[in-house]
Amino acid sequence: MTHPRTSPATPGADTAADPLTDHAADPLTDHATGTGPRPAADPSDPAPGTTSPGTTTLAAATPAELRDHVTAGLDDPARGWLRRALDEAAAHPGTHGPISVWELRIAEAGRRCGPEHADAARVLILHAARADAEALSRVYYQGTGAERRAVLYALPHLVPGPEGLPLVEDALRTNDTRLLTAAVGPYAARHLDAHQWRHAVLKCLFTGVPVDAVADLDRRAEGDTELARMLTDYAAERTAAGRTVPADLHRVLTLTDPPATPSAPAADHG
């Protein structure tokens, strides 16, 4: 873990100014504090475009289901390490000294469990430690991008109220697609207000995060005429600038008002 910072933009993301933020994105600034460097790439991260065992599992599975899934994929040393880490977290929740033992285990998870299972292992440790909103905030703001992602996945399991929203809002200010994917899960669907949620959807379209990652998309988009207006304006801006319109935009637009929404333009084969 390191000092508070904002996760880096994903290489290859659209580098045009993000129309969805209130200020120009400074990739070297922590927008939670206004100071501090962005984090370096975390060596425990999976390759871009991959997240295992899957964002749906991480965000929605029960801890027991998640543990069964993860331990089945670990070798014996990693399985033993995870079992000990979960036992330690359950026996010593909260903070003990400058840093709790379970926070150290979160930092070790990538090395011990490998990048394929690190996210899930961290979510399980946070759950075993019964981390509350204060503890989750500490791990998030002092953690690597991978640790921040695990906190976001753990929010719906651990924080019943809106106390974790500042973490979601911070993640939505980044262009890190893996962090954004974690931020638009069930916790955001439950607690973001309409204005924030609409901008989260547009941020996904801007950065290339598939809208499949947006939890409860069908229900929240249904009949949302303001979201339809925003999508239409965004499509017009991209078209005027000679840029392609994301296919996912037409999908979301259809959800807002199926009978009245025109279909996506046919591809030009000529």
Image (spheres, helix red, strand yellow):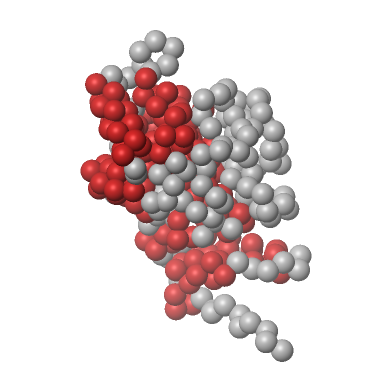
**Residue 105 appears in the rendering:** yes
When the figure is inspected, residue 208 is found, relative to residue 105, above or below; the finding is below
User: Looking at the image, which residue sits at the far front?
Assistant: 76
Q: Position of residue 247 (x, y in %)?
A: 57, 70
Residue drawn at the location 67% of the way across and 49% of the way down: 11
Quarter of the C terminus within the rendering: bottom right
Name the foreground residue: 9 vs 259: 9
Res. 103 image quadrant: top left
Name the foreground residue: 217 vs 181: 181
**Residue 31 appears in the rendering:** no
Q: Position of residue 31 (x, y in %)?
A: 61, 32
Q: Position of residue 125 (x, y in %)?
A: 33, 32
Residue drawn at the location 56% of the way across and 38% of the way down: 43
Q: Position of residue 68 (x, y in %)?
A: 25, 46
User: Looking at the image, which residue sits at the far bottom?
Assistant: 270
* Relative to 262, 83 lies left or right: left
When the figure is inspected, residue 244 is found, relative to residue 262, above or below; the finding is above
User: Looking at the image, which residue sits at the far right?
Assistant: 241
User: Looking at the image, which residue sits at the far top?
Assistant: 97
When the figure is inspected, residue 128 is found, relative to residue 261, above or below; the finding is above
Residue drawn at the location 64% of the way across and 68% of the way down: 245
Name the foreground residue: 138 vs 262: 138
* Relative to 15, 157 lies left or right: left
* Relative to 216, 251 lies left or right: right
Tally the numbered discs. 0
Residue drawn at the location 34% of the way across and 44% of the way down: 74
